[in-house]
Amino acid sequence: MPAGIAWFMTAFLVLWTGTAVFATIKPRYFWQITQGWKAFKEPPKAYFVFSAIGTGIFAVIGLALLLLPFYHSR
């Protein structure tokens, strides 16, 4: 893989994983940033619980994709 594409892919995965970790830790604040401006009221607590679970899965996927080259090279 060319070096430019590898750097772009790494930068994308770091951004993806960082955003997913942030959304997992602070789902209510992430909702306020992304959806809160167009809502009349806040969603129920279950929404934030399921949102944290879903973004946690995406964070694990991003971390696995970031670490994949280190395990593949062995």
Image: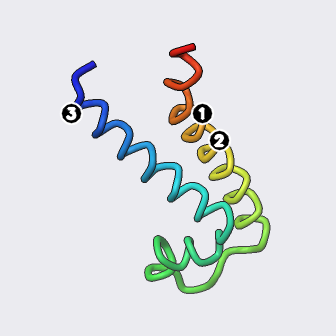
Label 1 to label 2: alpha-carbon separation: 6 Å
Looking at the rendered image, the disc whose residue lies closer to the viewer, 1 or 3, is 3
Label 3 to label 2: alpha-carbon separation: 25 Å
Residue 25: give x, y in percent of width and height.
68, 66
Quarter of the image with the C terminus is top right
Which residue lies at the image location 53% right of the left edge and 32% below the top edge? 65
Helix or strand or loop: what does disc 3 sit on?
A: helix
Q: Categorize mark 1 by other alpha carbons within 10 Å: few (<14), some (14-19), many (20+).
A: some
Residue 61: give x, y in percent of width and height.
60, 37
Q: Identify the residue under disc 1.
A: 64
Which residue lies at the image location 48% right of the left edge and 77% below the top edge? 33
Query: 61 or 41: which is nearer to us?
Result: 61
Name the disc covering residue 18, or none.
none
Which residue lies at the image location 65% right of the left edge and 71% below the top edge? 26
**Colour style of the rendered protein structure:** rainbow
Helix or strand or loop: what does disc 1 sit on?
A: helix
Q: Identify the residue under disc 3.
A: 4
